[in-house]
Amino acid sequence: MRVRPAHLALALLVGALPAVGISQERPSYSRADTLRGSVGPARAWWDVTFYDLHVRVTPADSSITGWNGITYRVLQPGQELQIDLQPPLEVDSMVLGGTKLTHRRDGNAFFVRLPGQQNPGEVHTVTVHYGGKPVVAVRPPWDGGFIWEEDGRGNPWVATANQGLGASAWWPNKDHGSEEPDSQRIAVTVPTPMVNVSNGRLRSTTVNDDGTTTWEWFVTLPINNYGIAVNAGSYAHWQEIFDGEDGPLTLDYWPLAENEEEARRQWAQVPPMMRCFEKWFGPYPFYADGYKLVETPHLGMEHQGAVAYGNGFQNGYRGTDLSGTGQGLKWDFIIIHESAHEWFANSVTAAESGDLWIHESLANYAESLYTECLTGSKEAGAEYVIGTRERIANDRPIIGDYGVNDQGSGDKYYKGGNMLHTLRQLVDDDERWRGTLRGLAREFRHQAVSSAQVETYLSEATGIPLAGFFQQYLRTTQVPTLELVREAGRLAYRWADVVPGFDMPVRVAVGEEPLTWIRPARDWKSMDAPVGAALRVDPNFYVALRVLDGR
């Protein structure tokens, strides 16, 4: 799926603002990073419409073999394709219409020469045959790849998790966030009696003569490539129907058979989660493909329509509360966070890895919204998100470098969530804020988008000029600081550590007075303040406070 044209006005404005507070130490990038993160000449001229993926998984020797039929539409004349597949996997052959193609390897990418120029509007299929022993995940899902484990009964248990590493760690594809097929088949062959659960809906199960079974799953809607998953093991299964905004939605549960009782207890959190997120974000984006929760030998991942779960059937994040407030122990972190990604990551997808705040900031913020839904208390949700500020590092800007494989700072989680919580305060109307979030999910449904597009949408939907706001929080490491100086019977105040164009009002209170709005600027302003009365800033705003001796 191609990226929608960006709103140039915002992009130009953002680019024109000075990069106040941005770290001068930028990462260095390899050629492989550039090939992976950029839409170069061998990627730009063709658009994937369908992947037909067939993989045989052999736990006995940790190997895979298979093929992927890559169907694409020609956008402009071209003759060379970049298809990505990472070592140690090897390509056996590439075929187009019965003709074997020549190709050369450049690190993690193969450049495929076609027999003749292809022209706009044509549709072709290149089939890539490949195999080997894929990279083994060391610290999944972060340092991802294939996971080869055993369950508690000694049965083989296999899964994939490869968001950071890339889908090309185990299957050949056009490995860039801007590219999503319109649909996809995932046919996985595993030793009988293993069960494989992948994305979409199960179309067929074929018992083969060689002691294996092929599980064919089909995704009817656009899907990001890192969301494609193998989950093979000794699974139990049950289903329930959720009465959702768009009608009946199937909820399928796939725990290990040995853990079914625990899963039935813990996974009862799914329907209330779905009810809350449909309220805040609109209808679940994949009714046609359903929702699944699948137990995995890794912590979790937002695999579209087949959310990976490995949190040990306990509340919190591995039993801990990331907010330090107690609110995070009232619900299961992996169910809530990873399911929120169905809206923001799987439906609304960042085209550039540098814009992954679109995934993680919104999913992080969804945790506080769920806390609010669960407790019935807006204050409880606020307490949760404010509590996560202790985890903000401000080491790098949230947005990473473009055109390379850079995912920006880890602050896209907690800082990004607090940025959105701050924006809710600026809107100061919860129904309008809810409408804004639902509109965001609707406007970019099933699309790969840029940060500029999302920023423009939020500015327009809220009616608030937000260019300086997003420049500050997404592209600098500085926290907006309200500086104060006490004068006779007055307080002088201004914004410090902010970019030009940062024009954010904030709620404050003097002494025991109620909260009221002020609009600081980079120049000093003042307000009445009784002698000895302290000024406090509404903690719902992610800002700092600095009291000076004088000016």
Image (cartoon, helix red, strand yellow):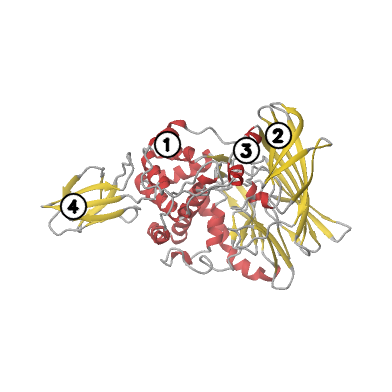
**Which quarter of the rendered picture does the N terminus lie within?**
top right
**Residue in front for this viewpoint, 218 or 44:** 44
Q: Position of residue 496 (x, y in %)?
A: 28, 48
Q: CA distance from mark 3 to mark 2?
A: 19 Å
Q: Label 1 sits on what residue type?
A: Gly
Q: Label 4 sits on what residue type?
A: Val
Q: Give left or right: position of 98 versus 495.
A: right
Q: Secondary structure at mark 1?
A: helix
* Residue annotated with mark 2: 80
Q: Position of residue 89 (x, y in %)?
A: 73, 52
Q: Label 2 sits on what residue type?
A: Glu
Q: Residue at x 33, y 39 (%)?
A: 501
* Residue annotated with mark 3: 1
Nearer the observer: mark 2 or 1; the answer is 2
* Residue annotated with mark 4: 485
Q: Give left or right: position of 218 versus 139.
A: right
- Quick one: label 3, few (<14), some, or many (20+) residues within 10 Å? many
Nearer the observer: mark 4 or 1; the answer is 1
**Which numbered tag is attached to residue 123?**
none
